[in-house]
């Protein structure tokens, strides 16, 4: 007897019906579950293709933004984003490969909701552009992305400007569209150079912006078309609005069917234009030159210390620039004209600098180095008179020129 009272015994008919119900339930549980349709096996007619663009983040490696391809099965509702922006710090030799310019990045896939929730939580914008893919093109894109996701295909050699998360997404879309994306973007001029886009996006980390600008060679100053400039996710997002494709019936239609802002940006946005570094660096160079000249007259020890700091930094910068040019695959840093301004010859002037503190004569070697350095600066200035792609290093010219002039004067100056 229970606390709730006695339960009445079931009748014969009731027991029979209960047995039939249990038998049917058991058969249903033992039956194999029907295959659930999803992105991986949905027909192309059920696949919706979108470009997802994430705005720049706060950390320096997030300043260039990010993007991904979203495939959505309109029947099951499953949505997966495929992106090419994953790297592994634990990879063997990662730091050495990074220094040599031989980094390996990976492709990854995740449920769209999971990916987009993260970017929304950290305040980065999320934009979806629904693209006009035919069923056959959508299926081809899905098959390519799944093939690319296999362990033997998932890695690729990364390059900041020509092989990154945005260019791989761009190339995958172009491949599935039968190559119609590339010629249309190549026909459109770009808005900025690699250097300008880099300075613009890194301007909130001024110290890093200056280091990158100092290390970029003439490769970063070549004119770009929209295809090249779409190494940036936000540029790809803007430029595909101008692309047209053929529909199923052969008529031209916009590639972007609709664009929706899924989450607004809550961070400080990057400026629309690259900062002009000429005036700030020119003023910094003049200030340092004036300080050296004044210290040489009134505080010889301070002059020697300040001058030594400049020479050591100039020499170290030159060593780094030489290594980037000769021992790495960072082609954006090759043939850097800033080597004419900052080079290892600066180390040879350290002894002469401390001798000049006591107004001792400068050695023949030091005199020769000074002449070579001044000629190098003049050559760096003269390069801007040439036609073609010239490295836009005027800010560093304006910084280095007054400092080297004062340095040459102070090493050669003798009080009457």
Image (cartoon, helix red, strand yellow):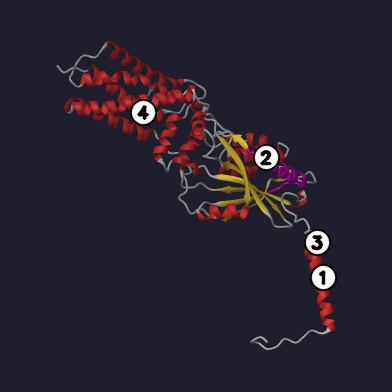
Disc 3 residue crowd, few under 14, some 14–19, many 20+, Cα 10 Å: few
Residue 16 x, y percent position in the rendering: 84, 78
- The percent position of residue 22, horizontal first and vertical second, equals 80, 72
Residue 23 disc label: 1
Question: In 3D space, how far apart are the residues under numbered discs 4 and 3 (Cα atoms)?
Answer: 79 Å
* 2 or 3: mark nearer the eye: 3
Q: Is residue 181 visible?
A: yes
Q: Residue at x 81, y 66 (%)?
A: 27
Q: Is residue 204 magenta?
A: no
Badge 2 marks a residue whose secondary structure is helix
Q: Quadrant of residue 398?
A: top left
Label number found at residue 33: none
Q: Splitting the image into 4 quarters, where does residue 176 fall?
A: top right
Among numbered discs 2 and 3, the one appearing first in the sequence:
3
Q: Residue at x 75, y 53 (%)?
A: 46
* Of pointers 3 and 1, the one earlier in the residue sequence: 1
Q: Assign a secondary structure to mark 3.
A: loop
State the CA–CA distance, disc 4 to disc 1.
89 Å
Total labels drawn: 4
Q: Earlier in the sequence, mark 4 or mark 1?
A: 1
Q: Looking at the image, is mark 1 or mark 2 earlier in the sequence?
A: 1
Q: Which mark is residue 31?
A: 3
For the N terminus, which image quadrant?
A: bottom right
CA–CA distance between discs 1 and 2?
Answer: 47 Å
The span picked out in magenta is 131-154
* Residue 25 position (above or below residue 115): below
Q: Are marks 2 and 4 in contact (CB under 8 Å)?
A: no
Nearer mark to the viewer, of 2 and 4: 2
- Residue labelled with disc 2: 148
413 versus 13 height, above or below: above
Q: CA distance from mark 3 to mark 1?
A: 12 Å
Q: What's the mark number on residue 398?
A: 4
């Amino acid at each position: 007897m229970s606390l709730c009272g006695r339960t009445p015994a079931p009748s014969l008919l009731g027991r029979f019906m209960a047995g039939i119900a249990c038998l049917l339930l058991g058969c249903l549980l033992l039956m194999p579950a029907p295959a659930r349709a999803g992105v991986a096996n949905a027909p192309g007619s059920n696949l919706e293709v979108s470009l997802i663009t994430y705005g720049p983040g706060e950390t320096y490696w997030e300043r260039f933004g990010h993007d991904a391809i979203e495939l959505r099965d309109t029947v099951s509702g499953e949505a997966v984003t495929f992106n090419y922006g994953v790297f592994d710090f634990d990879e063997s030799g990662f730091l050495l490969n990074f220094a040599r310019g031989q980094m390996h990045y990976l492709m990854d896939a995740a449920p769209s909701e999971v990916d987009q929730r993260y970017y929304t939580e950290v305040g980065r914008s999320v934009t979806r552009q629904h693209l006009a893919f035919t069923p056959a093109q959508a299926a081809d894109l899905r098959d390519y992305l799944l093939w690319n996701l296999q362990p033997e295909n998932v890695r690729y050699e990364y390059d900041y400007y020509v092989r990154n998360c945005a260019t791989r997404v761009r190339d995958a879309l172009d491949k599935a569209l039968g190559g119609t994306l590339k010629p249309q973007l190549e026909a459109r001029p770009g808005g900025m150079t690699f250097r300008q886009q880099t300075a613009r996006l890194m301007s909130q980390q001024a110290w890093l912006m200056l280091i990158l600008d100092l290390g970029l060679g003439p490769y970063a100053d070549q004119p770009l078309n929209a295809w090249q400039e779409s190494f940036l996710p936000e540029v790809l997002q803007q430029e595909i609005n101008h692309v047209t494709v053929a529909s199923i019936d052969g008529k031209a239609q916009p590639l972007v069917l609709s664009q929706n802002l899924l989450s607004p940006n809550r961070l400080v946005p990057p400026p629309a234009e690259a900062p002009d570094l000429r005036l700030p660096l020119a003023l910094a160079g003049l200030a340092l030159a004036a300080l050296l000249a004044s210290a040489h007259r009134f505080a010889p020890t301070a002059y020697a210390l300040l001058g030594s700091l400049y020479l050591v930094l100039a020499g170290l910068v030159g060593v780094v620039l030489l290594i980037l040019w000769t021992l790495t695959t960072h082609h954006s840093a090759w043939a850097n004209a800033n080597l004419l301004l900052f080079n290892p010859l600066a180390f040879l002037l350290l002894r002469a600098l401390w001798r000049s503190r006591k107004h001792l004569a400068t050695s023949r070697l030091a005199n020769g180095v000074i002449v070579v350095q001044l000629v190098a600066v003049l050559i760096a200035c003269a390069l801007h008179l040439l036609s073609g792609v010239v490295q836009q290093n005027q800010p560093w010219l304006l910084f280095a020129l007054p400092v080297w002039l004062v340095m040459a004067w102070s090493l050669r100056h003798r009080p009457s």
